């Protein structure tokens, strides 16, 4: 694998060297140079290290000089596009090309009247790549005057407001204008550059004209992106934009798009874009929300929020804009209440799972709290007009506000109640788990003590058995055994711990007392199980298993074989505390001469399965790795005393020799793979093929197959 990668890298380096030589020696052939530049671009796109190597061999600087000195427009375009693509792919190439000399050359291409539209587009593309995420590039684009040329193109490329993208010339001009908008966006932001923002704010009047005269997605989106990024986190630029009427223009466009959103989905999406731009205008200056109240923007945003096609991110943008609108403007706060904005915010707060959206809705509700405090004051101190009709309206509004707040308090009370109930359920579950685990430990300890007492029983063993049986009865009477085993792990633990109890009953000594204790214990288990069946709708797995085990124990104790087997123990029943698996447990059972009925059945079934599996392997000849392994199994099935016969010698046929050479040619010296890939005679081994091949290659006629 490493050799293949090394080979590819070497091929890439060879190709780049040859292409660079082609560029140098084909100066009189522009078509060949263009094809070589396109090939270099494709190689750099496929391999991230190609751009670095191309820079190291001097190819990047040669292409830059070629774009400046070439007389052919197609070569200049291809060279600029290659530079932009390589710089976009690799940050080291971007830093290498980020020089004042290159920015001056690009400025000359943009300002030259002889440059066609496509050459200007390629120049703008290179500027975009060099400035993106690069503060040095932002500084150079300003110091070289390149940003001034870009602002001039923003004003002059599209001269008509009636945009016809079906016309080829108009479409190329629009592509250039759109590229200029994107380049100006990266010049002022990411990272933010205050000086470039101050230069680009001179374009706001022209941008307002485009918004008013052409409400199309092709114009609205790039213009709003440019305005939003130029305004971001700059109070001075925000004030200037509002002073030239930019916020009024955005409000008018938003009203128009909201009215059209009921007809087309694109209008709703476009209205969200304008909403984000409005939010960027008033985010740092909430007092400017008064301008939005003239156009009733709050009611429009609430209507837009109910649109079904919007996702959570778009709804978050709308709610955040509502929060900034109502932060320091009483008119917008009142407009929010009048248009049932409070229930919408509460609904968004309770239904949404987005943390950002919940924070935005909480921000709006916090702003609404201010207006409610003012409305609760006397009507004479209200800041609006004081005629009688308005006072009546204010009184009605106060009643509506009280109803809204009552609903909000009810919803919050229900949420708190649900949270309290959930916490109580968690605490109760933890207590139940703790009680169940403690009861399980007590039961296991009791069963272990009972097993130890049954092995080394003294003169007071009978009394101990009675006390142990009473403890078990008390545990069962309290419903511990029926509720403790809530999962399979606990049930298996209890069943394993119950094995020593049944095993100790097989010892001779005081059998009658033990049988009585066991029968009483089983009776209590049976009664507890029947009680659980009557009182519960669904039975636990342990209840069903305990009934089956009890019946088996009672039937075994009542059988005649019980008295005979008391002196002996089954190894599978005794080995409870040992770490067992499928291998050592099988050996343990086979080595035990006194197997219980249950483990005897298991051993017989296992032996029967193994013998059938061997027969099937020998007969069907399946699941075998090589022909040699297949013959070994067939020989093992014969008598152990039989003498193995020597293999019959079989000469290689001409066809087999052809198979051998073809296999080596395709697969190399993988003899086992060749053996399975071609139909050799029965009995051939991989070693036979290797020996035959080496012998044949020594002969002169097969020296070069």
Image (cartoon, rainbow, N blue to C red):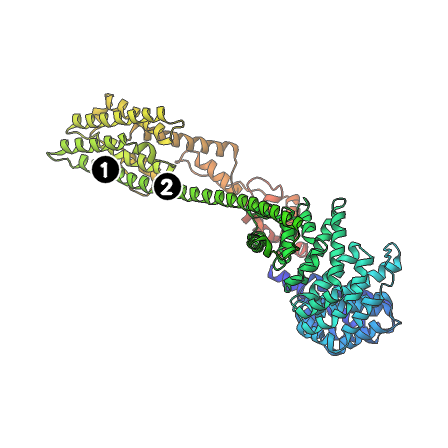
- Secondary structure under tag 2 reads helix
The image quadrant of residue 306 is top right
Which numbered circle lies on residue 446?
1
Furthest-front residue in view?
388
Left or right: 246 with respect to 429? right
The image quadrant of residue 68 is bottom right
Location of the N terminus by quadrant is: bottom right
Q: Position of residue 647 (x, y in %)?
A: 51, 41
Is any part of residue 506 visible from this angle? yes
Left or right: 202 with respect to 330? right
On screen, 391 above or below 421?
below
Mark 1 burial class by Cα count in 10 Å: few <14, some 14-19, many 20+: some
Residue occupied by mark 2: 428
Seen from the viewer's position, the closer of residues 373 and 416 is 373
Seen from the viewer's position, the closer of residues 184 and 532 is 184
- Secondary structure under tag 1 reads helix
Left or right: 657 with respect to 588? right
> Which badge, 2 or 1, comes first in the chain's sequence?
2
Q: Position of residue 449 (x, y in %)?
A: 21, 38
On screen, 612 above or below 271?
above
Left or right: 476 with respect to 669? left
The number of numbered badges drawn on the structure is 2
Seen from the viewer's position, the closer of residues 101 and 225 is 225
Measure the alpha-carbon separation of dots 2 and 1: 27 Å
Q: Position of residue 642 (x, y in %)?
A: 41, 35
Location of the C terminus by quadrant is: bottom right
């Amino acid at each position: 694998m490493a050799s293949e990668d090394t080979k590819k890298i070497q091929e890439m380096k060879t190709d780049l060297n040859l292409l660079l030589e082609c560029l140098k020696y084909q100066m009189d052939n522009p078509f060949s140079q263009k094809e070589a530049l396109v090939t270099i671009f494709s190689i750099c796109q496929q391999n991230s290290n190609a751009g670095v190597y191309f820079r190291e061999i001097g190819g990047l600087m040669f292409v830059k000089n070629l774009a400046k000195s070439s007389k052919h427009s197609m070569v200049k375009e291809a060279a600029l596009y290659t530079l932009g693509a390589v710089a976009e792919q690799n940050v080291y190439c971007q830093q290498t090309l980020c020089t004042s000399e290159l920015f001056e050359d690009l400025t000359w291409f943009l300002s030259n009247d002889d440059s066609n539209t496509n050459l200007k587009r390629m120049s703008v593309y290179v500027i975009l790549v060099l400035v993106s995420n690069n503060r040095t590039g932002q500084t150079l684009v300003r110091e070289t005057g390149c940003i001034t040329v870009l602002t001039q193109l923003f004003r002059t490329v599209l001269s008509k407001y009636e945009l016809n993208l079906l016309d080829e010339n108009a479409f190329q001009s629009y592509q250039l204008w759109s590229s200029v908008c994107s380049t100006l966006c990266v010049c002022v932001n990411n990272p933010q550059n205050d000086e470039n923002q101050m230069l680009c704010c001179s374009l706001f009047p022209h941008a307002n004209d485009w918004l008013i005269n052409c409400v199309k997605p092709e114009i609205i989106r790039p213009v709003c992106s440019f305005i939003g990024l130029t305004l971001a986190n700059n109070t001075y630029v925000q004030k200037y934009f509002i002073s030239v009427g930019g916020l009024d223009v955005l409000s008018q466009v938003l009203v128009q798009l909201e009215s059209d959103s009921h007809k087309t989905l694109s209008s709703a999406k476009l209205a969200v874009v304008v909403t984000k731009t409005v939010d960027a205008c008033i985010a740092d200056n909430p007092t400017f929300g008064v301008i939005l109240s003239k156009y009733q923007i709050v009611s429009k945003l609430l209507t837009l929020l109910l649109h079904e096609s919007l996702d959570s991110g778009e709804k978050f943008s709308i709610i955040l804009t509502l929060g900034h609108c109502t932060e320091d403007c009483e008119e917008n706060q009142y407009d929010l209440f009048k248009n049932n904005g409070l229930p919408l915010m509460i609904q968004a707060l309770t239904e949404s799972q987005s943390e950002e959206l919940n924070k935005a809705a909480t921000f709006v509700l916090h702003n609404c709290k201010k207006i409610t405090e003012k409305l609760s004051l006397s009507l004479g101190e209200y800041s609006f007009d004081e005629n009688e009709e308005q006072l009546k309206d204010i009184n009605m509004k106060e009643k509506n506000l009280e109803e809204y707040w009552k609903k909000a308090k009810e919803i919050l009370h229900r949420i708190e109640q649900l949270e309290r109930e959930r916490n109580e359920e968690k605490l109760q579950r933890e207590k139940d788990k703790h009680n169940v685990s403690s009861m399980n430990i007590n039961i296991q300890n009791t069963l272990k003590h009972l097993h130890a007492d049954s092995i080394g029983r003294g003169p007071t063993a009978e009394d101990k058995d009675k006390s142990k049986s009473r403890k078990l009865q008390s545990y069962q009477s309290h419903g511990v055994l029926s509720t403790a085993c809530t999962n399979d792990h606990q049930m298996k633990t209890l069943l394993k711990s119950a094995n020593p109890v049944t095993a100790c009953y097989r010892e001779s000594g005081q059998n009658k007392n033990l049988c009585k204790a066991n029968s009483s214990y089983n009776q209590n288990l049976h009664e507890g199980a029947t009680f659980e069946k009557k009182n519960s709708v669904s039975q636990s797995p342990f209840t069903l298993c305990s009934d089956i085990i009890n019946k088996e124990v009672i039937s075994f104790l009542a059988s005649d074989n019980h008295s005979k087997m008391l002196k002996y123990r089954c190894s599978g029943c005794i080995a409870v505390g040992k770490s067992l698996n499928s291998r050592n447990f099988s050996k343990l059972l086979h080595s035990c001469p006194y197997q219980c009925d249950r483990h005897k059945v298991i051993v017989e079934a296992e032996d029967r399965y193994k013998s059938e599996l061997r027969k099937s392997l020998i007969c069907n000849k399946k699941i075998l790795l090589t022909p040699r392994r297949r013959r070994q199994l067939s020989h093992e099935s014969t008598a152990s005393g039989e003498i193995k016969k020597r293999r019959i010698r079989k000469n290689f046929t001409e066809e087999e020799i052809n198979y051998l050479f073809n296999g080596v040619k395709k697969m190399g010296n993988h003899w086992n793979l060749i053996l399975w890939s071609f139909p050799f005679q029965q009995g051939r081994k991989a070693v036979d093929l290797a020996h035959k091949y080496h012998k044949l290659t020594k002969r002169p006629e097969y020296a070069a197959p």
